[in-house]
Amino acid sequence: MHRSAFRLGLCMALLFSASAAAFSTQEAVDTVTAKLICDCGCNNLTIKDCTCGKADRVRAEVKGRLDSGQTPEQIVRAYVEEYGEQILAAPTTQGFNLVGWIAPFAVLLLAGSFLVLALRRWARVPWHEPPLAPMGPGARAPDPSFLKRVEDEVEDVER
Amino acid sequence: MPQFGSLCLILALIASAWSLVASALGALTRSRSLITSGERSSLAVTAVLGLASSALCVLFLKDRFDVEYVASYSSRAMPALFKVAAFWGGHAGSLLLWVLVLSVFSAIVIVQNRHQNRGLIPYVVATLSGITVFFLVLLNFTSDPFDLLGFTPPDGKGLNPQLQTPLMAIHPPTLYLGYVGVAVPYAFAMAALLSGRVGDVWIRTTRRWTLFAWLFLGVGLLLGGYWAYIELGWGGYWAWDPVENAALMPWLTATAFLHSVMIQEKKRMLKVWNMSLIILTFTLSIFGTFLTRSGVISSVHAFAKSGVGTVLALFLGTVITFSVTLLVWRLPRLQSEGRLDSFVSRESSFLFNNLLLVGICFAVFWGTIFPVLSEAVRGVKITVGPPFFNTVNFPLAMALLALTGICPLIAWRRASASHLMRVFLYPASLAMAVFALLLILGIRELSPLVAFTLCAFVLGTMFYEFYRGSRARQRSTGESFPSALGKLIGKNRRRYGGFTVHVGVVFILMGVVGSSFFRQEATFSLRRGESFQAGRYTIRFQDTSSSSDAHMDRFEAILALSRGGQEVGLLQPGRNFYKSFNQPSTEVDIYSTLREDLYFILIDFDAQSGLATFKYYLNPLINWIWIGWIVLFAGTHVAVWPDSRERALLARTRLIEERTFA
C-alpha cells in the first residue's frame, strides 16, 4: 500500500515535471519564433504566427535545438548567421538600426517641443480687441457674478 | 468589345486633358464658356469611363479569354459575382476602377456646385482632371486592361481562391472610395491656393467629403482585417504589411485633419497646417498606390512588378512640388487671424492630438521605408516587422487615447482649474475603479493595465459628456431625459457624432489590447470521441465529413463544444482543396461571444490512424473591434447628417467670401 502510494506519487511528480518541461519549451519556442520573420510571402508574419509549411518546419527545428540544450540567444544567432539579419522580425538595437528605433520618438519629441513653444507664444500674443465704449458718468463696473455667468454661457455655447 | 474599351480609354484621356486645359484657362481668363466646356468634358470622361468599365465587366462575364487581363484573373468555373470582382483583381483593372471612381466624384462635385463656389470650381475641376489625366496616361500607355493575347486559351487562370469571398470582392472598392475621396478636399485646397480664396469656405464645403473618404478608408482597413482574420488562419487581423500601412497612413493624417479644421473654423488659425495636412493625406494616398504597384517593397498585396513604379514616383514628385510651391506662394495670405486664449485649452489639446496622429503616421512611414534606407546606407537587408510597429506605436497610441479622454473635458478658449477638477472627477474615479478591479483580477502586466484604465477613463468622459449635456438641457426645458438626450444629439450632431466615434475607437482599442496581450493558443491531436480542454471550453472530436464539387474537395472535422457541462455549439474547421489552383486552403471556424473568440483550425488529418491535429486561438475581447467599427460608422453618420444651422453658416461664409472677391 505504502509502496504503491509512493509509486503513484513518483509517477505524478514525473508527469508534472514532464508537462512543466513541455510547457516551458513551448514558451521558449514561442519566444524564439516570435523574433524570426517568415519569408514565405503569405503575409508579414513571424514564424510563431505564420501558418505555412515552412514556419511549421522552423518551429520544429527550433524545438529540436532547444531540446538539445541550445539557449534561445544561441538559436537566434545561428539563424542570423545562416540567413542574414533579414530573418529578424525587428531591427537589432545596434549601430545604424538604432536610428530606426529612435527616430520616431526623436521626431515626435522635437515636434512636440516646437509645438509647446509655439503654443506659449500664441497664448501670449496680445489680442487686439476693439476698444470698449468709454463708461459714462455714473456707470459702474459690472457685477463679477454677472461676468462669470456670461463667461459660463459663452463657454457652453462654444463647447 | 476590347477595341471598344480601348477606344473609350483614349477618348477619356483626350476629354480629361481638354477638361484640364479648358478649366485652367477658363479660371485664368474668367471665360465662362471655357469653364463650362471644362466641366462638360469632365462629365463626358465619367460617361466614357462608365462605358469602358461596363465593357470590361461584359468581357469578364462572357469569359473572353482572348483578353489578357480576363485570362489572368478569371476562369469559367468562377461564380458571376467573383467574375465581376476580378475586374479589380489585378493592376490594370484596379487602375481603371481608381480613375472611374475619381471621375464619378468629379461629376458629383460639378453637379453639386452648379450654383455655388463658382470662384473655386474651375480650379477644382482642373486639379481633378489633372489627376485623371495622369491615371489615364498610365492606363493607356502602360497597363491597358483591354490588351489582347493574340490567341484564345481554353480557360483563364482564375482568381486566387482565398480572394473569392464577398469580403474581398468589396474590400478594394471600399478602400478606393477612401483613397480617391481624399482627392476632392485636396482639389478644393489647391483651388483655394490657386484662387487666393483661402478662407474656410473650402474646408466647410469639403467637410463631408473628408469624412466620407476617412470613413471608407477606415471601413476598407476593417474589411481587410476581418477578411485576414476569418480567412488566413493565423488568428490575427493586422500584420503591419507595407500595403496595410499605406492605407493606415492617410487615414491617420485625415483623422488629424478632421480635428484641426475645427480650429480653423472656430479661431481662423492653423491655415497653413490644415493645407499641409490635406496635401500630406493626398500624397500618402498616392504613395499607397505607388507602394502596391512599384515593387519597391515586397508585400502580400503587391501586384506583380508592372513597370509603372517610375511613372508613379514621378507623379508623386509632381504632386508634392506643385502643392508645396503653391503653399509657399500663398503663405502671406495664410496668416492666423486669431490667437489662443490660454495654453490649457481645447485648441491646444487638439494640436497635441494632431502631433500624436502625425507622429504615429511618421512611425509607420519610417518603419515601412526603413528597410530600403538600411539597404542604401549599410548595404544590409533587414526586416521591419510587427514587433517593431507594436513596440513603437503602443506608447503613442496610449498617449493619444489619454488625450481623447482629456480633450473634450477641456473647455474651448480657456480652462480653469476648478472647471477641470469638476469635470475630471467622475471619469477619473471610474478609471481608478477599473484599475483596482484589474489588479484584483490578477492582471499585473503594465501595458494592458494602462490601456484598459485609459479606455475606462475615455468611456467615462464620453458618457459623462452625454449625461451632462442632457441634464443641462433637461433642466432648462423640462423634457424627459431620453428626449433631452435625443435633442441634444440632434442639435449638436458634429459634437456628439464625434463623441460616438470616440466610443467606437475605445471599443476597437479594447479589442486590440485584449486579443494581443491575453491571447492563448495551443496545438493538439485527437481521435474521434476524444476531448480537449481549451480555456473554459471542452472540445470533443465527433466526426469528419467530406464533399466534392467541380471546383474543390472539402474536408471538415466536426467538433462539439461545451462550456460548464453545457453543449454550446458545433465547430467545423476544415480544409478545401481547389482543383484549378492545386492548393489546399484552411477553413477556419470560430465560436464568438462578447467575451472572446474560440478560433479553430484543422491542421492535419491522418485517415489511417484517424488522428486529427487542431490548433486553437482564444482571442479575448476581439469582437469589440468589429463592434467598435459599427459604433464608429454610426457616429460618423450622425456627424455627416445635414444640419440646417451648419448650412446657414456655410452660406454666410460663402457670401462673405464672394463679397471680398467681388
Image (spheres, coloured by chain):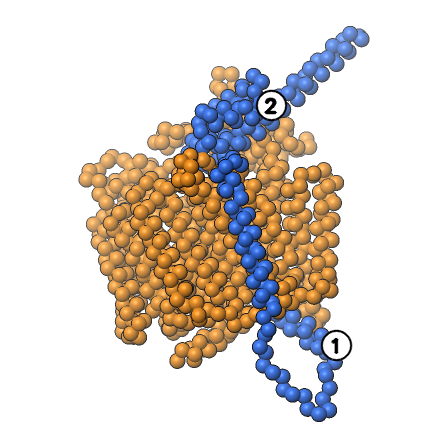
Q: In this rendering, is residue B539 above or below B58?
A: above
Q: Earlier in the sequence, mark 1 or mark 2?
A: 2
Label count reads: 2
Q: Nearer the viewer, residue B33 or B661?
A: B661
Residue B368, given in percent of the width and then of the height, sits at 45, 43
Secondary structure under the numbered disc 1 in the rendered image: helix
Q: Which mark is residue A81?
A: none
Residue B598 screen position, x and y as percent: 58, 35
**Residue B51 visible to an observer of this rendering:** yes
Residue drawn at x 51%, y 60% as measured from the top left:
B258
Left or right: B269 in relation to B37: right
Which amino acid is tagged 2? Answer: Thr
Which chain is disc 1 placed on? Answer: A
**On the same chain: label 1 and label 2?**
yes
Residue A25 numbered tag: 2
* Mark 1 residue type: Ser
Q: Residue at x 51, y 56 (%)?
A: B255
Q: Callout 2: few (<14), some (14-19), or many (20+) C-alpha neighbours within 10 Å? A: some
Which image quarter: residue B617?
Answer: top right
Q: Is residue B585 visible?
A: no
- Residue at the image point whose x is 57% and y is 67% from the top: A122
In the image, the chain rendered in orange is B
Question: Which numbered disc covers residue A145?
Answer: 1
Q: Is residue B308 above or below residue B197?
A: above
Q: Colour of chain A?
A: blue
At horizontal 28% and vertical 50% (from top left) the residue drawn is B139
**As rendered, which of B537 and A93 lies closer to the eye?**
A93
Q: Secondary structure at mark 2?
A: helix
* Cα–Cα gap, marks 1 and 2: 71 Å
Residue A106, percent from left and from top: 54, 48
- Front residue of B255/B608: it is B255
